[in-house]
Structure formats: structure tokens, C-alpha cells
Image (cartoon, grey):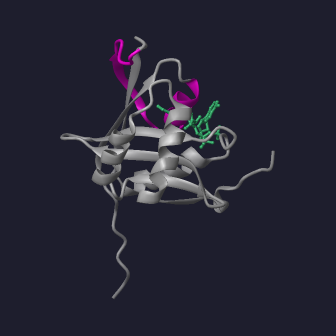
Amino acid sequence: MENLTTQKVEIRPVRTEDLSFVYELEEQSFKDPFPNYFIDQLADANSETFLVAVYSGAIVGYAVVDDWSDHQHVVSIAVRAGFRRRGIAQALLDDLFERSRPGPLRLELRRSNHEALQLYMKNDFRETGTAHSYYTDGEDAIRMEKLIEKKTEILAPA
Ligand SMILES: CC(C)(COP(=O)(O)OP(=O)(O)OC[C@H]1O[C@@H](n2cnc3c(N)ncnc32)[C@H](O)[C@@H]1OP(=O)(O)O)[C@@H](O)C(=O)NCCC(=O)NCCS
């Protein structure tokens, strides 16, 4: 398969016209996909941190960070099968890290999801615990957290 470089992939905030493609990607990517109305709510609430990856005009990935009361939460990330292992999830996360507030960034993943575990470990998330029977089929979730550092502002000389 052609080697896709992330330079050809645009990462940008989601638009209303993208949402039907996000629903489809969510459906294809998870055993227990979020319902469409919940994805709409996430998009409404997170205009800067609900990102899509676009390749040749098509949505090939998405990721969303939601603001929770005491931290920010990676609610979902998925890359279309056939476009994986080409750095798209990494590009989405890099952009989200830039956009996230300083403080804890948390997430859950299925214990069996080795791809996601590798992705998060590579990005300095650390395991913080287990949520037993977290998913509807009874599988446990691993909880992870990464600390987003305060950004140092580089001031241009006057
Ligand atoms: C997990 C997922 C988002 C990764 O997307 P991706 O675009 O293929 O990931 P990237 O190409 O950016 O990979 C970045 C890093 O993640 C890890 N990784 C990704 N896929 C991997 C795999 N199949 N095996 C091992 N490590 C993997 C690697 O550390 C990789 O870095 P490397 O290529 O330098 O080794 C994708 O597999 C997916 O959509 N899965 C289904 C949905 C899902 O499980 N989402 C996570 C919910 S918690």
C-alpha cells in the first residue's frame, strides 16, 4: 500500500458536514460505538478539541477531548482501517496536546486493546488503575493519565 505521509493529512476541528462520516467511523471502529446524538453533543461542546483527519477530502480519523469537571478526557480516537500505522492517530494527539489546558488528561481503554495501549504509552500516558467491567460486554478498562505541562510563552524581543 502507498506510504501515506501525515503531510498529506489535514488535521482540523470538526464541521457539521463531517459528522455523518464520524458516525460511520465510530460504528466501524468500536464494539460499543457512541450513539450519533452523543457525538453531536461532543462536537457542540468541544469546537476546538474535536478534531478530524482529512485525506483527499475524506475523513480518515477523528479524536475528541472533552472538558470534565476536574480534568480533560480523551473520549474517543479512531482511524479508518486501511489508514492505520501511518501516524494519523499520532498527528491527532499531537494537535490535541497543543490545544489541551495544562493539567491531567485522562482516558480509558479496553484491556485487550494493545494498539491503543502502545499508542498511549508512547505518548507518556501512565496507568492509574482498572475500572472493572467498564464496558457493556463486561471487559475491564485500563485508566491512564498524562500531565499536560503549562506552555512556556516565548516572547519576541521588542
Ligand atoms: C488505536 C488507533 C487509533 C491507532 O491509530 P493509528 O493511526 O494506526 O496510529 P499511529 O500510526 O499514529 O501510531 C502511533 C503509535 O501507536 C502505536 N500503535 C498504533 N498501532 C499499533 C499496532 N497495530 N501495534 C502496535 N502499536 C501500535 C505505536 O506505538 C505507534 O508508533 P510507531 O508507528 O512509531 O510504532 C487505531 O488502531 C484505531 O483506530 N483502532 C480502533 C479504535 C480504537 O481502538 N481506538 C482507541 C480507543 S481507546
For this orientation, the residue located farthest to the bottom is: 158
Task: Pick whichever, 19 or 51, lies toward us.
Answer: 19
Task: Pick whichever, 6 or 125, lies toward us.
Answer: 6
What quarter of the picture does the N terminus occupy?
top right
In the figure, residue 152 lies in which quadrant?
bottom left
Specify whether residue 110 is painted magenta: no
Look at the image and give the residue range highlighted in magenta. Answer: 114-136
In the figure, residue 8 lies in which quadrant?
bottom right
Left/right placement of residue 131 relative to residue 87 reads left
Specify whether residue 120 is painted magenta: yes
Task: Where is residue 115? Give x, y as percent.
Answer: 58, 29
Residue at 55% x, 44% y is 89
Left/right placement of residue 141 relative to residue 28 reads left
Residue at 37% x, 38% y is 75
Task: Where is residue 41? Give x, y as percent.
Answer: 30, 46
For this orientation, the residue located farthest to the left is: 69
Quadrant for ligand 1 reads top right
Q: Is residue 111 above or below residue 156?
A: above
Q: How many marks?
A: 0
What quarter of the picture does the C terminus occupy?
bottom left
- Residue 125 in view in this figure: yes
Task: Pick whichever, 49 or 33, lies toward us.
Answer: 33
Q: Is residue 106 above or below residue 55?
A: above
For this orientation, the residue located farthest to the right is: 1
Task: Where is residue 92? Give x, y as percent.
Answer: 51, 50
Residue at 40% x, 20% y is 141
Q: Is residue 50 above or below residue 129?
A: below
